[in-house]
């Protein structure tokens, strides 16, 4: 299986912090995986994905995207090929749902028919009837609906890889569960590489084909949800799992890619 | 009342001309103020020193009454429309400047981060995201400036720049209360009318906030 993202000995420091936000991280993410990155706040999980789209720059080491060092790609070009979803959603309030979704395709100068078709297809995918929703403004939608738009906006221009930074963190439990199911469906259909940051262990186990557990800027364990539950690599992982009351019925396992 | 009738019979063209002149002086002044204050306000959010200096400087100038500025201007740039525009521009700058600075400071970080993360270049982020999001607050500043300027432009007549102040001055000179009332009420109507019109534009442009 081809490697989608590779970290080689990556170090990231923030000025004023006493420790490294990322401390010599080595990591290979295979194409088509849905990798969940799990850890407490301040463990470096958000920093890790923000290095991939160069919102932050690594201080040491190299990051490769499908074999190309991201330092050799212009940040703006790089970001146009990566879907990015954040917890605060960040929909543009002054633009309609249609215009929000069409943002990157328009930047990439797709023709109108193609954009139209893509927006319709995406809205249908998350069960929001296009005719009803495309001319609305984000303020008219519920939080769950807004994050559905956030998701499909990131998918619009068919990025090779999706970065999701606690996308469902601010959404109530029932909606969160529905969104997780939709994300699983999207991942199965699209077969893109997803990197999903969360501090919710149940979410990490439910969604991830692989789970990466981080603490203090270091990788604690990297494996399938089953491996992590059965063979915790160290005391930190063990305590994390026992704290989470993981329901093994909801662990994503044995699917293969 | 009959005297007012006579005034309109003989001077209706002057009346219209004064209104137009009044609006012309106001429009030019606000336009200059916008050209100066908006870029300065945006610069202030990027450079702290510019903000400190410019907010203090324009705030101080604002305290000086417009009449004083008008009279100080006369020996330097003479009478007529130019000193009037200078004085009114100075009056109009602070509200636009302060609101522009505030608007660009308060932009929601998450929305800007989303735009950057999606691969918009700095120009696209600025014109497609920052400017429309800052617009309501900037526009509120412009509206304040316009209403102040339209009211204050009455003083321009003192230095021979014309406008609705001329009717009031004539009324004072001839001791005619009817002309004082006519001038005063017209200024009030024009000022309120402009305010109303600007409110309509504001509501239209920010529809998305109230859906």
Image (tube, helix red, strand yellow):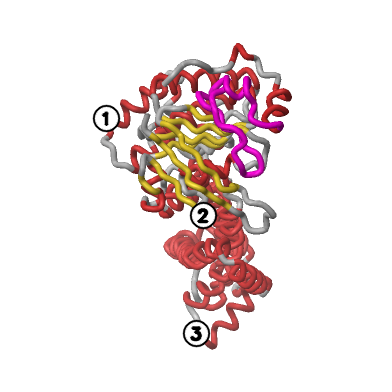
Residue drawn at (51%, 52%), measured in percent from left and top? A58
- Name the secondary structure under disc 3: loop
Report crowding for label 2: few under 14, some 14 to 19, many 20 or more residues within 10 A (C-alpha). Answer: some
Q: Nearer the viewer, residue A6 or A169?
A: A6
Name the side, left or right, on which A32 lies relative to A217.
Answer: left
Residue A30: image x %, image y %? 43, 31
Residue at the extreme bottom: B75
Q: Quadrant of residue A66?
A: top left
Chain under disc 3: B
The verdict on residue A238 being magenta is: no
Decide if residue B182 is in sight here: no
Which span is picked out in magenta? A206-235
- Name the secondary structure under disc 1: helix
Residue drawn at (62%, 48%), measured in percent from left and top? A21
Chain under disc 2: A
Q: Quadrant of residue B56?
A: bottom right
Q: Nearer the viewer, residue A92 or B92?
A: A92
Circle nearer the N terminus (1, 2): 2
Q: Is residue B18 above or below residue B211?
A: below
Name the side, left or right, on which B139 lies relative to B14.
Answer: right
Q: Nearer the viewer, mark 1 or mark 2?
A: 2
The reply to whether callout 3 and callout 1 are in contact (CB within 8 Å) is: no
- Name the secondary structure under disc 2: strand
Q: Is residue B208 above or below residue A144?
A: below
- Label of residue A113 in the image: 1
Q: Is residue A242 above or below residue A47?
A: above
Residue drawn at (54%, 37%), measured in percent from left and top? A86
Residue B167: image x %, image y %? 55, 67
Q: CA distance from mark 1 to mark 2?
A: 44 Å
Report crowding for label 3: few under 14, some 14 to 19, many 20 or more residues within 10 A (C-alpha). Answer: some
- Label of residue A60 in the image: 2
């Amino acid at each position: 299986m081809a490697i989608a993202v590779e970290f080689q000995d990556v170090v990231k420091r923030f000025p004023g912090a006493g420790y490294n936000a990322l401390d010599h991280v080595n990591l290979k993410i295979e194409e088509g995986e849905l990798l969940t990155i799990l850890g407490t706040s301040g463990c470096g999980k958000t920093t890790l994905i923000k290095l991939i789209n160069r919102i932050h720059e690594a201080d040491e080491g190299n990051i490769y995207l499908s074999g190309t060092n991201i330092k050799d790609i212009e940040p703006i070009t790089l970001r146009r090929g990566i879907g990015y979803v954040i917890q605060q959603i960040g929909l543009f309030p002054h633009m309609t749902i249609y215009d929000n979704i069409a943002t990157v395709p328009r930047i990439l100068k797709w023709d109108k028919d193609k954009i139209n078709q893509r927006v319709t297809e995406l809205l249908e995918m998350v069960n929001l009837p296009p005719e009803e929703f495309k001319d609305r403004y984000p303020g008219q939608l519920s939080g769950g609906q807004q994050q559905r738009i956030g998701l499909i906006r990131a998918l619009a221009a068919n990025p090779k890889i999706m970065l999701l930074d606690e996308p469902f963190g601010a959404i109530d439990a029932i909606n969160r569960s529905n969104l997780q199911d939709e994300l699983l469906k999207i991942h199965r259909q699209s077969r893109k590489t997803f990197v999903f940051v969360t501090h919710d262990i149940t979410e990490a186990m439910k969604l991830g084909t692989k789970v990466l557990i981080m603490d203090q800027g270091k990788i604690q364990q990297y494996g399938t949800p089953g491996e992590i539950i059965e063979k915790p690599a160290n005391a930190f992982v063990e305590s994390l799992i026992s704290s989470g009351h993981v329901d093994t019925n909801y662990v994503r396992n044995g699917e293969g890619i | 009342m009959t005297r007012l009738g006579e005034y309109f019979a003989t001077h209706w063209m002057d009346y219209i001309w004064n209104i137009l002149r009044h609006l012309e002086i106001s429009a030019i002044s606000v336009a200059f103020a916008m050209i100066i204050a908006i870029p300065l306000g945006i610069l202030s959010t990027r450079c702290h020193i510019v903000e400190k200096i410019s907010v203090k400087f324009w705030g101080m100038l604002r305290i000086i009454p417009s009449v004083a500025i008008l009279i100080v201007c006369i020996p330097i740039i003479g009478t007529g429309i130019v000193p009037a525009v200078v004085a009114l521009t100075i009056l109009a700058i602070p509200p636009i400047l302060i609101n522009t600075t505030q608007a660009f400071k308060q932009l929601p970080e998450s929305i800007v981060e989303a735009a950057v993360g999606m691969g918009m270049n700095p120009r696209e982020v600025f014109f497609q995201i920052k400017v429309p999001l800052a617009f309501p607050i900037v526009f509120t500043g412009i509206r304040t400036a316009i209403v102040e300027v339209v009211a204050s432009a009455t003083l321009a007549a003192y230095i021979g720049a014309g406008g609705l102040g001329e009717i009031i001055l004539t009324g004072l000179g001839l001791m005619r209360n009817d002309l004082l009332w006519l001038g005063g009420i017209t200024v009030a109507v024009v000022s309120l009318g402009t305010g109303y019109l600007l409110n309509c534009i504001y509501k239209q442009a920010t529809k998305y906030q109230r859906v």
